[in-house]
Image (cartoon, rainbow, N blue to C red):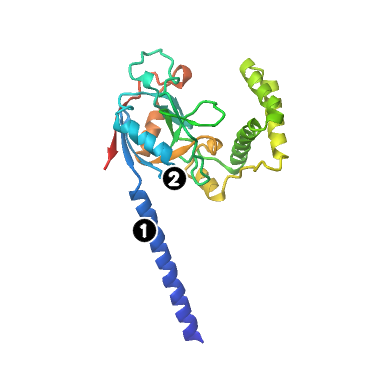
Amino acid sequence: MKLFSKLSSLLITCILMYSCQENQKEASTALENRQRIELVTNKGTMVLALYNDTPLHRDNFINLVQHKAYDSLLFHRVISNFMIQAGDPESRNAKAKDTLGEGDVPYRVKAEFLPHLFHKKGVLAAARDGNPERASSGMQFYIVQGKIYNDSLLTIAEKRINGWLAEDYIRKDRAHSYLLDSLQHHSASGNTTKYMLYKDSITNWAAHAKEFKAYTIPEAQRAVYKTLGGVPHLDQNYTVFGEVIEGLATIDSITTTITGEFARPIDDVRIIAMRLVE
């Protein structure tokens, strides 16, 4: 009986070891199969890996890099503990006080939200405007710096995520579209009190709708936000399509730059070149 028990334990151990080795091989293969991009700036170099789970964004980004669309552009928006943003084609020849951020290619990329892709430090994500489909800018992107969160801050972030998801849900429900119209009106007029009132109304209404599924930040992702850091309130609202695999320190270097109006760096932070890594 003892011999059988020992043999069983040995067999289980071997199976677990084999399983772990296979999982490590799969993870390694998945990483190897990702297209990598070298991003060289005047503040340092990063290497990005594009996710195959978001093929529309991956292929669009590869095409732009191949055509050198990002070479010589600025990181035109830099916010410490948040993110660094680039991709405005107007920034290539911008003068010191030019307002940037509106330039783009004449198309959007369909949103690709996936529950396992989230805004941890170092991820590459697509910027976007307030279009109803939450489609991404064809060219502008950001890289997350973020900060470390505790449980109470993650709870607040989760509430913000669900507020945006509620807006998206109600946008598709004609019977309650007046709430969204009122929200947009008070946002444009700068009436913060009324804006928050309607925002709470939308969130509360959606919370009681049978079809609305509230989002919960998974425990594994919460653990990352509490150690590595990131920007959790953007999850499921902006498409994440890659990550920095080398050069995280370059993000920190860029975020130390002094910024002026609209978070544009006083001294230009420029993309010298991007290229595909074979």
Q: CA distance from mark 1 to mark 2?
A: 18 Å
Q: Earlier in the sequence, mark 1 or mark 2?
A: 1
Q: Which quadrant would the C terminus be assigned to in this image? A: top left
Residue 226, disc: none
Task: Please determine whether, in this image, residue 115 is positioned above or below residue 95.
Answer: below
Identity of the residue drawn at 68% across and 34% down: 203
| Quarter of image, res 243 | top left
Seen as rendered, the residue at the extreme bottom is 1
Residue 251, given in percent of the width and then of the height, sits at 39, 34
Query: From the viewer's perspective, is the residue at label 1 or at label 2 nearer?
Result: 2
Quarter holding residue 21? bottom left
| Left or right, 210 with reference to 132 | right
Dot 1: within a 10 Å radius of its alpha carbon, few (fewer than 14), some, or many (20 or more) residues?
few
Residue 122 in view of the camera = no
The residue lying at 38 percent from left, 29 percent from top is: 254
Amino acid identity at mark 2 = Asp
Residue 179 in picture, x, y percent from top left: 70, 26
Q: Find numbered disc 2 in the image and state the secondary structure of the residue it sits on.
A: loop
Please name the residue that numbered disc 1 is placed on: 25
* Residue type highlighted by circle 1: Lys
- Residue 206 visible within the image: yes
Residue 53 badge: 2
Q: Residue at x 50, y 85 (%)?
A: 2
Mark 1–mark 2 CB contact (< 8 Å): no
21 and 121: which is toward the camera? 21
